[in-house]
Image: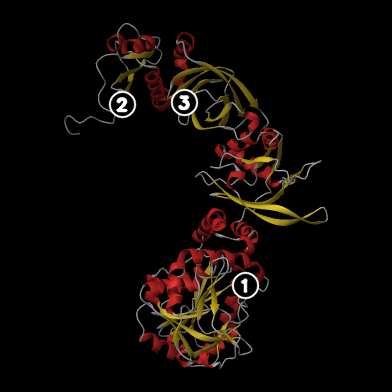
Amino acid sequence: MKRGARPLFLCRLAQDCLLGLDGAPADKGVIAEIDQASRRALAFDWSGSKLHLWLMNDVGDPAALVGADRGFTALAQFFAARNFSPEEQASFLKSLFGTFLPMLGRQRLTTLEPLLRDLLIGGNLPRGSGRLVSVAGQATAVLVVSERMPIEDGDLLVLGTEAGLDVASVAETVRPIDPGLAGVKLVALMLQGQPRTGVGLALTGAGLAAMAITVDHHADPAAFHAATFRDEPDLFSLFYRHSNEARSALDVLSRGETGESGLRLRGSDIHFWIETAVSLENGTFIKGWFRDPDHRIETVRVIHHTLVETDLSACWITHPGRVEFRNSLATATHFTAFLPRKTDGLTPLTAAVDLMLVNGERHRFRLPQSREDRLGQRQAILNALSQSTFDDALRDRCYRPALSDLQSRINSLQSIAATKRFGREGNRKVSIIIPLYGTTAFMRAQLMAFAIDPMVAADCEIVYVVDDPLIQSEVDYILGGLDYLHALDILMVTLARNGGYALANNFGVEAASGDRLVLMNSDVVPEAPGWLEPALSRLDQLPYASVIGARLLYADHSLQHAGMFFFKLAQGYWQNMHYWKGYGRDFPEALTEREVPAVTGALMILDRAAYRDVGGFTADYVVGDYEDSDLCLKLRERGGVCIYLPSVTLFHFERQSMASNQAQSDNGSTVFNRALHSARWSERIVELMRQFGEVIDVA
């Protein structure tokens, strides 16, 4: 070590141990405790607001080290000689109890009982009392004290236990949400032993404080948690937040909850009902309704300390509506809210709700049990979304915080589980990416069309991305059987779970080999060979980051796609629209190549480099809407154009590439994605539609 350096820690365990926070000890003020049996001495010094300790072995003459007074009773004289303020005394003891002595072994704490006794009896400290709630087998305990007691997060409490003294760290202090606990605060502690009723010493930022502590110990954890789940939601949520053991038990209780998620007050028209509650890592989404014709409801609070904001009535967004009431439809107030959670990722399955009336009456019920699987959570939120009342406030304050974070977590779990090659290796100049979900109905028709097309057979790699593990074996069977019939270059990419259209394409592109990409839905089938050559030739003539779309036909030969444009709805959101959808295939204007605002994701032809340059499909859209127009707008930002090429003709059996029962459930995702897309691109869309002469009024 460089001469003159001041070590942070310097240890010689065989002879002595010097422990310091900074620098060398001062030359005065040293006091010590001597263990005559082991001939070990603990000495410490407080110098320049730094605490230094020595643990000495074979000390020889202790008097030479500590002088005449060898006991911790010298602490009072030490404080007096240094003229320590209460805050300095507390800081010193927090270092002593909280840092150094635990490093030296818990057995040394028992020798400090005389010190604690001296402080509590002769220290003239502020005094208070508290109830310490502890549970057998759990390190977490909750101290209930007056709100005037100056205990805050990070403070220490020295408590008596069956084994001697214990230093408990304060994990969190909270004010109860339950109005019935006014005037107190709850202190979550982490204990090392079973506490006992007696006197405790609080080492706080404001100084030292003595407390008479009454231990409320519960030997039966199951009975205790059942009682708090039912009657003491503040304790329920604190134990949930800080105790792994309690959390498991409380989740079991939550799963068994069968009570009603609302209330009907007899003798009045007050009805309050929670229809949907989804507990997420970043918060809780809640939707419901109430009738309160006389305006008697004052506040509604969710009692759970994992939440940053618990006042539901201060956060919700309301709108008028109608509900079934007494066998008829009646007016009601519908509400939606998102309550953000503290950054610990805990997701309680339910929580208590307190409804307070203006006359002081309190009524309690519970949130309905939340779904635990992320896909189920997402669908529950989407099912709660109503297009007729959706607006920017609901999007930004309720649905976007819930769905965007949830979608990000779902996306983060996706990965490639396996890849498998079929057929022969071709030139792989072009990769045709085809996600599969729910059905394989069109695979054979696609493969037959590819096989009879010389260019596809020679130059294309067919990449089937299995976005549904349930159909993996069926896809494998189909490709394995047709391998003997069609000499195609095929790659099967199986994803670990369903992640949606955008991620399936992104993973497929990363696994693919071609410099050119054809992004194709699994229900798109070429009408005839020769469809790809003109598209690639035209792409060579376009600026970088351009994309080509094809003429897509329904099974009855009517137009499904001849380019896309954007139409502004009454709510102010831009909807993707198709030119001449449903017209005959030979409608004259649909037979002309032209630039269009966007093209559909059912069939896109573009450079792989451009796709990767813009980050591929944006993956925060839910299920599968608006990713295609989003990609087109990103490509335009890079200088590309979107070209509709009618000479490239394929059939598109729209929406049949997904399970038949999904179209209805996608309504919520379409509404959300449209609002998200509009928030992201509205200004650019206005400019673009004016460029195409399609906007009459965008006010």
Q: Tell me the amino acid under the disc marked 2.
A: Gly
The disc, 2 or 1, on the residue closer to the chain's N-terminal end is 2
Q: Observer-nearest residue: 587 or 186?
A: 587
Q: Judging from the image, what secondary structure is the residue with disc 1 in?
A: loop
Q: Tell me the amino acid under the disc marked 1.
A: Gly
Quadrant of the frame with the N terminus: top left
Q: How far is disc 1 from disc 3 in space, using C-alphas? A: 57 Å
Q: Judging from the image, what secondary structure is the residue with disc 2 in?
A: strand
**154 on left or right of 14:** right
The disc, 1 or 3, on the residue closer to the chain's N-terminal end is 3
Vertically, is 44 above or below 362? Answer: above
Q: Observer-nearest residue: 36 or 170?
A: 170
Q: Name the residue under label 3.
A: 156
Question: Mark 2: few, some, or many residues within 10 Å (few <14, many ≥20)?
Answer: many
Q: Tell me the amino acid under the disc marked 3.
A: Leu
Q: How far is disc 2 from disc 1 in space, using C-alphas? A: 65 Å
Question: Mark 3: few, some, or many residues within 10 Å (few <14, many ≥20)?
Answer: many
Q: Judging from the image, what secondary structure is the residue with disc 3 in?
A: strand
- The extreme right residue here reads 327
**Residue positioned 46% across, 64% down in the render:** 680
Which mark, residue 438?
1
**Residue 541 location, x and y as percent?**
35, 87
Q: Mark 2 points at which residue?
A: 20
**Residue 373 location, x and y as percent?**
61, 56
**16 on left or right of 625:** left
Q: How far is disc 3 from disc 2 in space, using C-alphas? A: 20 Å
